[in-house]
Amino acid sequence: MTEKEFGNFYLYGMHERFRYWLKRVGWLGFLFFLIKGLLWLIIPYLIAKGILSK
């Protein structure tokens, strides 16, 4: 297997793992973790700007 073939195989495997994970958790779980991740970024930013207090 050449390096190019190995790279394609690795990317294909990542894509398939993500699809399997998405099916397992479902859209509700995906949205939950997306919103949670965004809040982890937004809240410290707002605290640093002084909009939210600790």
Image (cartoon, grey):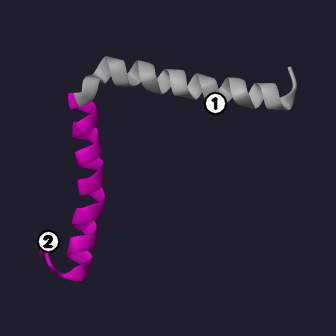
Q: Which residue is mark 1?
A: 11
Q: Quadrant of residue 52?
A: bottom left
Q: Residue at x 63, y 30 (%)?
A: 11
Q: Which residues are magenta?
A: 28-54
> Which residue is farthest right?
2
Left or right of residue 30, residue 4 in this image: right
Query: Please, is residue 38 above or below residue 11 in the view?
Result: below
Q: Is residue 45 magenta?
A: yes
Q: Which residue is mark 2?
A: 54
Callout 1, which amino acid?
Leu
Q: Quadrant of residue 50?
A: bottom left
The N terminus lies in quadrant: top right
Q: Secondary structure at mark 1?
A: helix
Q: Residue at x 56, y 28 (%)?
A: 14
Query: Please, is residue 20 above or below residue 38 in the view?
Result: above
Callout 2, which amino acid?
Lys
